[in-house]
Image: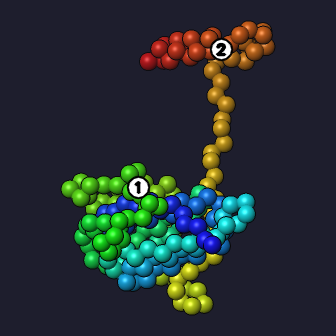
Amino acid sequence: MSRVPEVKWAQRQDKVFITVQLPDAKNAKVNLEPEGVFSFSASAGAENHLYELKLELFDKVNVEESKINVGVRSIFCIVEKAEKGWWKKLLRGDGKTPHYVKVDWDKWVDEDEDNGAGDLDLGGMDFSNFGGMGGDDGMGGFEDSDDEEVSKPQQEVRKAGDTNQEEEGEDKSDAGITEGKTEAAQST
C-alpha cells in the first residue's frame, strides 16, 4: 500500500507553486495534464516505501510553460495557470482539503499584494519544463535527478591577535570578542 507525501502550495495571479515534501526521493515521476491533474510517485526512506499522489487542481494549467525541480528534500513545481486569476483553493470540488495539503506561508502572497513581478527567490534552482519531458507514454514523466543541495563550506574567521593568544595558551573566549569590538570601533 502506498503512502501520501506532504504537499505545500501557494499562488500568484498567473501560477501555482506546489512543493512535494519527500526527502531522498528515488525514481520520482511527475505528470501534469492540461485539465489540471497533477500526479506524483516516488520511493523514499530506508525501506523504499512507495509514495503516490494525485491532485485535481482547481482549474486548467499550461503544461508547456510549467517547470519542475527535483531536489534532495523536495520536488518543487511552478505550475502556470491557463488563465490568469486567483483560485479560491488549490483543488476542485466541494470536499474538505486533504490533511496532507498545506499552505506554504513562506511563498504565500495575498491577492492585493501580488504585483506580478515574480518576487519569489528560487535560490538558483535548476528547472526543467514539464512540456519538454515526454516519456514513453508522452505524459511528461521523468526519472530521478542528480541535483543536490550543496552548502557552502564553513570558513574559520580569525581576528587580529587570535593566533598569539592560542600560542600563549590564554583563554581567548572573552579576549577575542572584546578585541573584535575594539577593532570595529576603531575602524569606524
Cα–Cα span, label 1 and label 2: 41 Å
Q: Is residue 115 above or below residue 63?
A: above
Q: Which picture quadrant has residue 70?
A: bottom right
Residue 25 placement, left or right of 184: right
- The answer to whether one can see residue 99 in this image is yes
Residue at image location 52% in from the left, 12% down from the top: 182
Between discs 1 and 2, the one toward the N terminus: 1
Q: Secondary structure at mark 2?
A: helix
Residue at image location 24% in from the left, 70% down from the top: 85
Query: Can you tell which mark lies on residue 173?
Result: 2
Q: Is residue 58 above or below residue 122?
A: below
Q: Which picture quadrant has residue 170?
A: top right
Picture coordinates of residue 17, whole percent (x, y):
41, 64
Classify the position of the C terminus by image quarter: top left
Q: Which residue is mark 1?
A: 104
Q: Nearer the viewer, mark 1 or mark 2?
A: 1
Residue 124 placement, left or right of 116: right
Q: Is residue 68 above or below residue 33?
A: above
State the residue in front, 159 or 55. 55
- The answer to whether one can see residue 129 in this image is no
Amino acid at the residue labelled 2? Ser
Classify the position of the N terminus by image quarter: bottom right
Amino acid at the residue labelled 1? Asp
Picture coordinates of residue 73, whole percent (x, y):
59, 57
Neighbour class for label 2 at 10 Å: few (<14), some, many (≥20)? few
